[in-house]
Image (cartoon, rainbow, N blue to C red):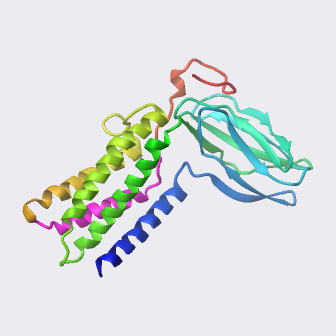
């Protein structure tokens, strides 16, 4: 393949991995349709929200006979379930979940009713919603862009490693640089704004996003070292590229930061927790 073709293939692979990660991540809204006693109602249930205000949960339906309510509980607590009636405004039924601390989670259900028949939009399992702080665009946008470029250069380096006529050394250097800036400078800043901590991976925690970034960085440093003194180190580069591709495909925020409510005084889950 020519270099342009390799870049196009690398872009396609990177976009596919990014799309898969986004669609399967625990912060991606739950979407679907449900039959409410003869009326099909589409829904989009949030699983991530900023903690500057209560989280609006709404469902659109023109059928005025349909009413609804929210039930929620602080995640991993023994709190009783709290019920909030949803209100109608035009074709939208709305309820609000109380904002929580950074990384605080609520398990909730949306229940719609018509003519005495109730239906939970998420079935028997509740939706888990995690709250986060506001991340400035000046940090968030460069982080997303640079991590995408790191994955792109990683994939391109792996493709070069498969071609005996190409030397992936420059691509390896660029991948290491981009991964370090995106994952170990901008990433911790994102984490700090969103959840109040710079790093929650090894050795301080089990945050999967931090840990998979660390594994990827180690793999690429190994490939960089293996390619010193003019060595092409194709096997190392290909291995590092595959490792990052697999890691990049793991849903983002899986096993992410989680607030421990047991550290708070016993308070009602209907209010705002400091």
Q: Where in the figure is residue 59, as x and y percent of width and height?
A: 76, 49
Q: Is residue 51 above or below residue 219?
A: above
The front one of 197 and 84 is 197
- Taking 184 as reference, is 90 left or right? right
Quarter residue 230 falls in: bottom left
Q: Main secondary structure of the magenta part?
A: helix
- Taking 86 as reference, is 270 left or right? left
Q: Where in the figure is residue 20, as x and y percent of width and height?
A: 49, 62
- Taking 21 as reference, is 163 left or right? left
Q: In this view, does 169 lie above or below 274?
A: below
The front one of 140 and 244 is 140
Boundaries of the magenta span: 231-255
Quarter residue 248 falls in: bottom left
Q: Where in the figure is residue 12, as x and y percent of width and height?
A: 43, 71
Number of numbered discs on residues? 0
Is residue 130 shown to the viewer in this render? yes
Q: Which residue sits at x=33%, y=76%?
A: 4
Q: Where in the figure is residue 30, as x and y percent of width and height?
A: 64, 53
Residue 112 belongs to magenta span: no
The front one of 140 and 110 is 140
- Taking 100 as reference, is 179 left or right? left
């Amino acid at each position: 393949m020519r270099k342009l073709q390799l870049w196009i293939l690398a872009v396609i692979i990177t976009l596919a991995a990014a799309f898969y990660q986004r669609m399967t991540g625990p912060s991606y809204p739950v979407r679907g349709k449900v039959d409410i006693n003869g009326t099909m109602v589409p829904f989009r249930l949030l699983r991530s929200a900023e903690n500057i205000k209560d989280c609006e949960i709404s469902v659109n339906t023109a059928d005025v006979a349909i009413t609804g309510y929210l039930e929620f509980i602080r995640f991993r607590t023994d709190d009783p379930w709290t019920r909030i009636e949803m209100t109608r405004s035009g074709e939208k039924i709305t309820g609000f979940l109380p904002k929580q601390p950074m990384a605080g989670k609520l398990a909730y259900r949306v229940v719609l009713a018509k003519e005495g028949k109730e239906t939970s939009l998420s079935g028997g399992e509740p939706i888990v919603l995690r709250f986060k702080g506001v991340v400035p665009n000046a940090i968030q946008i460069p982080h997303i862009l640079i991590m995408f470029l790191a994955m792109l250069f990683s994939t391109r380096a792996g493709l070069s490693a498969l071609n005996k006529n190409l030397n992936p050394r420059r691509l390896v250097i660029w991948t290491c640089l981009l991964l370090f800036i995106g994952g170990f400078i901008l990433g911790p800043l994102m984490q700090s704004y969103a959840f109040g901590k710079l790093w929650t991976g090894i050795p301080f925690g089990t945050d999967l996003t931090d840990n998979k970034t660390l594994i990827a960085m180690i793999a690429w440093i190994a490939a960089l070292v293996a390619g010193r003194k003019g060595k092409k180190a194709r096997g190392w580069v290909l291995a590092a590229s595959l490792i990052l591709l697999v890691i990049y495909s793991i849903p983002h925020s899986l096993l992410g930061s989680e607030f421990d409510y047991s550290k708070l005084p016993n308070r009602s889950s209907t209010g705002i927790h400091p």
